[in-house]
Amino acid sequence: MTQNKFAQKSIDPATQTMLSRAEQEGIETAWNRLESQDPQCGFGLLGLCCRNCNMGPCRIDPFGNGPERGVCGATADTIVSRNLLRAIAAGAAAHSDHGRDIVEALLHAAKGDAPDYEIKDKEKLLSLARELNVPSEERSEKEIAADIAYKALDEFGTRKGNLDFVGRVPAQRKNRWSEAGILPRGIDREIVEIMHRTHIGVDTDYVNLILQGLRAALSDGWGGSMWATELSDVLFGTPTPQRGESNLGVLKEDEVNIVVHGHEPTLSEMIVQAARDPQMIELARSKGAKGINICGMCCTGNELLMRHGVPVAGNFLQQELAIVTGAVEAMVVDVQCIMPSLTDVAGCYHTKIISTSPKAKFPGAQHVAFDEEKALEIAGEIVRSAVENYPHRNEAKVLIPSEKMEFVAGFSVEAIVSALGGSLDPLLDAIKGGSIKGIAAIVGCNNPKIKHDYGHVALAEELISRDILVVETGCAAIASAKAGLLLPEAAAKAGSGLRAVCEALQIPPVLHMGSCVDISRILVVAAAIAKALDVDISDLPLAGAAPEWMSEKAVSIGAYVIGSGVFTVLGTVPPVLGSSNVAALLTEGANDVIGATFAVEEDPIKAAELMENHINDKRAQLGLS
Ligand code: SF4
Ligand code: MSK
């Protein structure tokens, strides 16, 4: 097998090495399974199949040679838009339920039921209290935190008319949402309403359906995700710039390797703490290991690296490959983006897959139920189980790729403001003066339909070379970390204007702003800049991209990003092409309603061109040279 074959699948040498190893060992990966699905269902790719009732399943013939309506009479427009909405509902539910878990953790901590958690960022707690009109004078932090947690819980089925954080958007944007009837009312309410309206015989008007999709997505971006971010900061600390290392080379040959994978920081924070316990380190030594190495994967990795500089072993498509190194004693998973195949891969090694959430169990995995009331004790049990597994490692099977790369991450809004000297003004001045043309957000997953990491890295490099500052989250940010773009030295790859700004501030040209839910941080920056200039977010020289997206969460993200007024380029085609009306609404018509649209472009260089053109148009409209 030539190395070349694997270079078609990923630009990352560590991934190429491990794909080759997996093939030698006869281990199936997502890439193999994608091939085995070929050709994928044409109706599914176009969004033209419906299973919403048992008169179906129905499908519409896109060429007009077969049925044009489902049994109930639903058209292609209805079926495509309903399918899209159900994806948004699932994505918004995933983010928002994560948010709810964080709210509940804060509430438990405030009530004294979760003694291992403390309020790390008191300043942020007080700032939220002011924003939300929670009294703080002569009250304990726990009392304030409990009130904030109750306010947050109210947001899920709110009776107040709209979400609290709608107060963060410029008036122009709020007015647009009101006029379009998409002001998000309550997080759960919008998701439930999608499920109602997409039931057989309810909403069949594709425009009306898509508007509800936008409203539900906004309740994710400005609700569920934003609460997850804000209260994670209160509980675990607001991120500040941290140095760390990324890629599979962070796994250690002579230490107990524990990979924490998924999304929620509640358990992984405790695992980091438990692994630092001298008694646990001593136990590891007694088993022949030199120490305990905690590494992150996907967004759990992002949460930990943002706050502790914990190394990150990889992004979504590397989860199976981490196990193929033969050097992982335990992969501890919570929720979201965990491949069901992990237990099969782990079955070929000594690796334990330990599931922890009652919401996500995996046949073949060991389940250790997480409980906030005994968080550190349970984390200790998990770490101990991994340590005791170390002697079962088969040295003959160990292959850890050498590749690892340093990064600087942890750019919360507060950290960016601090790097700028206390306000966003220097950034605004750089944008007004043209040394930075605009800001691009690159977010989202990996997808084996796109060469792994190529979509992210090529786009980021192209944008910075065009003097566009890049902000990233999720697996996109991990791709940039591995490629060395999260280092201040990467400014050498930027255009002269952006390079000068980065060098003056000692910041990378690509800023890692966190996990998937932390796209809310990007929304906050966008809203703050718009307010400072007294314009709508859609007037700003901003653009978004999801070059390798795959999850329903990414569908919700895309919808709330354009709903917030930011033009967004998708690198993989969403299943909407079965309805020319829906496709036209998303790529053109939406501009009249929300001032932003989607574009689809698989080639990252062409995507950068689209984004720069958009940014230049917005600059011209603002009268900037
Ligand atoms: Fe078919 Fe209509 Fe039922 Fe969908 S809702 S499966 S289109 S009959
Ligand atoms: S982990 S949703 S693969 S970014 Fe947030 Fe990565 Fe996408 Fe999951």
Image: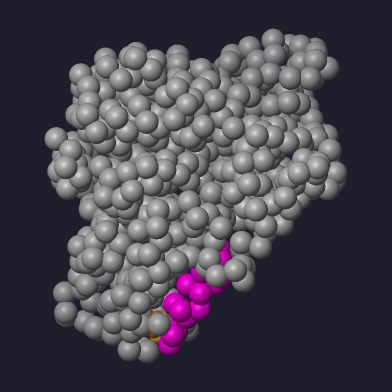
Q: Is residue 310 visible?
A: yes
Where is residue 132? Give x, y as percent.
Answer: 62, 52
Q: Is residue 527 found left or right of 77 in the rendered image?
A: right
Res 339 visible: no
Of 185 and 356, nearer the camera is 185
The answer to whether residue 209 is left or right of residue 254 is left
Residue toward you, 481 or 290: 481
Q: Is residue 519 found inside the magenta-colored segment of the image?
A: no
Q: Position of residue 96 (x, y in %)?
A: 57, 55
The location of residue 590, given as percent across then percent down, is 26, 64
The residue nearer to you, when weighing 486 against 422, is: 422
Residue sitting at x 67%, y 57%: 151
Residues rendered magenta in the picture: 186-202
Q: Main secondary structure of the magenta part?
A: helix
Residue 326 image offset from top left, x and y in percent: 57, 24
Image quadrant holding the N terminus, namely: top left
Figure quadrant of the C terminus: top left
In which image quadrant can residue 127 be found? top right
Total of numbered circles in the picture? 0
- On screen, residue 597 above or below 243: below
User: Which quarter of the figure has residue 436?
Assistant: top left
Q: Height in image: 100 above or below 530?
A: below
Displayed-image quarter of ligand 1: bottom left
Is 493 in front, or is 424?
Answer: 424
